[in-house]
Structure formats: structure tokens, C-alpha cells
Image (cartoon, rainbow, N blue to C red):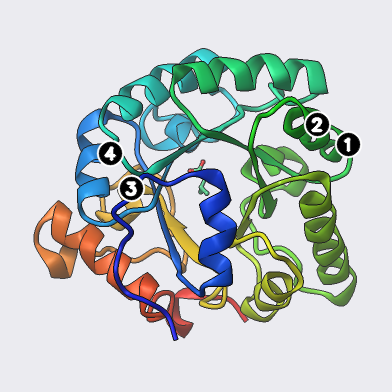
Amino acid sequence: MYTSTPQDKPWTVPMLADAKRDSRKLVMLTAYDASFARTFEAAGTDIILVGDSLGMVVQGHGSTLPVTVADTAYHVACVARGLSRALLVADLPFQSDATPERALDAATTLLQAGATMVKLEGAGHKLDVIRFLVEREIPVCAHLGLTPQSVLRLGGYKVQGRDEVAAARLRADARAVAEAGAAMLVLECVPSALAQAITSDLTIPTIGIGAGPHCDGQVLVLHDLLGVNSGHRRPKFVKDFLAEAGTVAGAVAAFAAAVREGRFPDAAHSYD
Ligand code: KIV
């Protein structure tokens, strides 16, 4: 049984695993400025992500690749001024995590701007990066499945882990990022059953986006939650919560309640 009340204490990194252990679903949204961040927190959001989606939804690029550490740090500082309770996660932009040393520099900049945790995409050589950061007191959220920084190799934004080999690889990668020290894992665009298996393999929380209802929490991009046209195709997992709620705070509250009660995502917003 899931609880449906947000927590009123400020979030810390160890509380993420506590929430999973206590079957409390985590509610996460992206934000890029102080006012949305404040509104989202007040409406019950646990975790705010300054995602490199900012390249697509704020800066108007066709991918996340042009986003820089300076861009992200600017938005992290803006968002941090709007928060008093939510955990603030910042994306390490494309190639800022190509080596452990580069990642340490970028992550230090983002933590000094106000983030509590950095998120990075992939496993493989990124396992060394995760270990290097965690050993240096930088909390890390991993991101597997559809990793948008791999768009050129992948040839588009597609569901990942559909065949047996790819699913086994993703499951092994998820274990590996957790063993390397990641404290949370975002799973993007993977079949629900695979996300469920990964979630039960791990003691760290999984946060789904297009990964079905069995993850330990859910994240949406602000513009998708509010039905704002960012100029990009709207994937199946996206739901416009503003259409029914009528206000931004109402949309966030509806999203948070639906996540906490296990009602979002439903089958219509998930992949088989
Ligand atoms: O950049 C971003 O907003 C993200 C979310 C889609 C998880 O990584």
C-alpha cells in the first residue's frame, strides 16, 4: 500500500532509500526557474530535476547535446532559490562526464550552484565516473534506458530493452550502477515488466519516465505536465495534467496524488 502524503521535512539523500523501503512513491518534476520550483514544491513534489531537457524545452534546440555546465549551473542557482524542502538534482551535460576528472569539475560547479545530487547517463565507462564522484562525496543519480545524450548513436528517441538480450543488458547495467554507488536510478522509455524487474533487483529507488507504474517514483518534464508545446513530438507516456486541473498548482497536486496512489502511469501511458 502506498502512502499519499508528501513529506514536510527537507529531503536528504539517505531518505531516498528510506522512502523505497517504506513503499513511499517519489514525485519528481523538472524545473528551470525559482517560481516553478517553488510552486512545484508547495504542491507536493519531492525532487526537482534541472534536466538537460532545458536544451530542448527552454533553449529551443533539437536535442540535449548543446547544453553546457554553465547553462545548467545558471538554472540550478535559479531553482535553488525557490526551494526549501525538495531535493535538487542537476544533470551533467553531454561530455561533461566523459572522464572522472571532468565530471568532478562539472559536479562541483553544480553542487556549488545549489544542487544536492548530479545525474548522469549510461553505464560502461560511466561506472568509473560514478565511483569517482561518490568516493568524493558527490551523490549520483544514474539514468538508463533511453539516454537522450546517445541520440546520435541510437538514431532517435526509441523504447529500449525490448528484446531479451537488450533487457538482460539493461538489468545488469542497473545492478552495476547501484553497486558503483548511485543513490537513485532514472529509467526512461523501457517496457513496464523490465522496469518492474529492475526495481525489485535494487535497494535504491527507481524513477520512471515512460517505464510503467512499478517504479519507486515518477518524473515528468514541466512542459509535458502542463501541455506546453515545446516543438517536439509528445511521447506516449506524457500526460497533460493541466487540462483537467485548471491551475499549475492543481496539475502538480494531481500528478503527485496519481503517482503516490499508483494511478500514474496507467497502461495507456506505458510500454509493453
Ligand atoms: O533532462 C531531463 O529532463 C531528464 C528527464 C527526462 C528524466 O533527464
State the CA–CA distance, disc 1 to disc 3: 31 Å
Which image quadrant for residue 87? top left
Describe the element under mark 1 as helix, strand or loop: loop
Mark nearer the viewer, 1 or 4: 4
Mark 1 neighbour class, 10 Å CA radius: few under 14, some 14 to 19, many 20 or more:
few
- Give the amino acid type for the residue marked by disc 1 in the picture: His
Q: Determine the residue positioned at 65% across, 67% down.
A: 190
Question: Which residue was labeled with disc 2?
Answer: 129
Circles 3 and 4: CB atoms closer than 8 Å? no
How far across and down, in percent of the image, does residue 113 sit?
A: 45, 18
- Give the amino acid type for the residue marked by disc 2 in the picture: Val
Question: Which residue was labeled with disc 3?
Answer: 222
State the CA–CA distance, disc 1 to disc 4: 33 Å
- Give the amino acid type for the residue marked by disc 3 in the picture: Leu
State the CA–CA distance, disc 3 to disc 2: 28 Å
- Give the amino acid type for the residue marked by disc 4 in the picture: Ala
Q: Quadrant of the N terminus?
A: bottom left
Q: Earlier in the sequence, mark 1 or mark 3?
A: 1
Mark nearer the viewer, 1 or 2: 2
How far across and down, in percent of the image, does residue 56 sit?
A: 45, 35
How far across and down, in percent of the image, does residue 266 sit?
A: 43, 81
Q: Quadrant of the C terminus?
A: bottom right
Q: Earlier in the sequence, mark 3 or mark 2?
A: 2
Mark nearer the viewer, 3 or 2: 2
Position above or below: 175 against 69: below
Question: Which residue was labeled with disc 1?
Answer: 125
Q: Earlier in the sequence, mark 2 or mark 4?
A: 4
How far across and down, in percent of the image, does residue 109 sit?
A: 56, 15
Q: 146 and 21: which one is in front?
A: 21
Mark 4 neighbour class, 10 Å CA radius: few under 14, some 14 to 19, many 20 or more:
many
The numbered mark at residue 37 is 4
Circles 1 and 2: CB atoms closer than 8 Å? yes
